[in-house]
Image: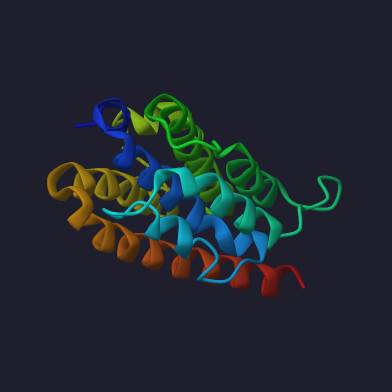
Amino acid sequence: MSLVELIAQADERGLAASGLACLDRCVPLLGGDDELLRPLWANLADGADPADWGALLEQARGKLDAPDPADADEAAVLARRMLDAAPAERSAADVRVWADACSVAALQIHRLLDPAEDTTEVDSRRADRTEGMPPLVAAELRRQVMVLQLLAHHGPAGLRRALDVSTVGRRILRAVVSRRTRQQG
């Protein structure tokens, strides 16, 4: 099943986790630490109050400075847009739009950071046209699919594993950003 189909079938929790996971993997571009989005992840668990989502989101936004678009590279600007676009309410309709946009943005970020050329549109990658895909983009696509499948098959019990998938992706992106900074500096 393609990523587009998985997003279309996901429930509110799966969509929120999907968007949050995409954002979480891109936090290194914003200078955020590994714990920045932890309260939002906890808000997806059973027993958490979905009404707290907006306040937790504002706390995360407040901990990060917005990059100056004139100085920041395109990848950092896209990551900040993901955070800024997160809906204040965790309604299925709002979270679906956000999760879809985060999916596209995260794939575009990985595409920008991958040294391999990729001339194929990101939307076709999400629809399963993966031949010739650069390795960093391919790995991000696999992680997005895995997060949605974990939540679809395991519900709230899949949150921990989805967070683990996201953590691995964040470490990889942090290493890519670090290597890129060393090469440029």
Quarter of the image where one finds residue 130:
top left
Q: Is residue 163 above or below residue 11?
A: below
Q: In this view, does 175 lie above or below 85?
A: below
Q: How many labels does the image show?
A: 0
Percent of width and height locating residue 37: 50, 60
Does the image show residue 120? no
Position of 15 with respect to 152 (left or right) is right
Front one among 4 and 114: 4
Quarter of the image where one finds residue 12:
top left
Tell which residue pokes out farthest to the left in this image: 153
Position of the C terminus by quadrant = bottom right
Quarter of the image where one finds residue 74:
top right
Front one among 80 and 95: 95
Q: Is residue 137 above or below residue 184?
A: above
Tell which residue pokes out farthest to the right in this image: 70
- Which residue is rendered at x = 61% and y = 48% of the image? 79
Front one among 96 and 78: 96
Does the image show residue 135? yes
- Which residue is rendered at x = 45% and y = 49% of the image? 20
Position of 130 with respect to 23 (left or right) is left
